[in-house]
Image (cartoon, rainbow, N blue to C red):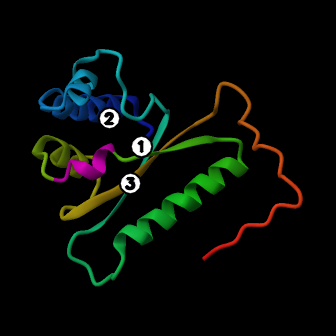
Amino acid sequence: AIQNKEILTRLNDAVKGVYARSSEPKTRGRGLDPDYNFFFSAPTFVIVSYKKETRSTAPLADCAVALQNIFLAAYSLGIGSCWINALTRMGQETTVTKLLEEIGMPTGNRVYGCAALGYPQGPFPQPPERKTGVTAVLK
């Protein structure tokens, strides 16, 4: 979990540097946009990683469940959350990997997902009303 603003800025700059070199115009535009922040400027950013070489049969599922529990716990405390995938695609990017290791991710780990956490500026969206008399058939 990262809450240090300097580290969050460095991480955002590293990700934007990768995006700026992209051949995909939309991604490159994000990297060149001075206001773009890949984790929506959240005050807390959680990185969930796992050893690349592991005995686990499902590290992606393990990490997804961990993030789901983070999101559920955050919601119960009135904290907003968002799944962030940017770092899952950057395993080959040396600048990003070195920074992640510098801030504490074990060498040889792979990022499987991240959580941006912060207090929302307004109320949480309310779910739509449930329809009565409707049954779902699963096949």
The residue nearer to you, when weighing 116 against 22, is 22
Tell me where residue 43 appears, x and y as whole percent.
Answer: 49, 33
Instruction: Give the residue type at disc 2.
Output: Ile
Q: Nearer the viewer, mark 3 or mark 2?
A: 3
Mark 1 crowd level (few <14, some 14–19, many ≥20, 10 Å Cα): some
Determine if residue 47 is in view: no
| Residue annotated with mark 3 | 113
Q: Secondary structure at mark 2?
A: helix
Q: Which amino acid type is marked by label 1? A: Ile
Magenta span: 86-91
> Is residue 108 visible in the rendered structure shown here?
yes
| Residue found at the far top of this picture | 34
Tag 2 residue: 7
Instruction: Answer with mark 3 or mark 2, whichever residue precedes in sequence.
Output: 2
Magenta segment includes 61? no
- Count residues near mark 3 (Cα–Cα under 10 Å), then give few for <14, some for 14-19, many for 20+: many
The residues bearing labels 3 and 2 have C-alpha atoms spaced at a distance of: 18 Å
Residue at x 71%, y 36% (from the top left corner):
124
- Residues at marks 1 and 2 touching, judged by CB atoms closer than 8 Å: yes
Name the residue: 24% across, 63% down. 109
Snapshot quadrant of residue 3: top left
Q: Which badge, 3 or 1, comes first in the chain's sequence?
A: 1
Give percent across and percent down for residue 127.
Answer: 75, 44
> Please, what secondary structure does the residue beneath circle 1 have?
loop
Residue that carries the numbered disc 1 in the rendered image: 2
Inter-mark Cα distance, 1 to 2: 8 Å
User: Going 26% across and 26% down the picture, which residue do you hit?
Assistant: 26
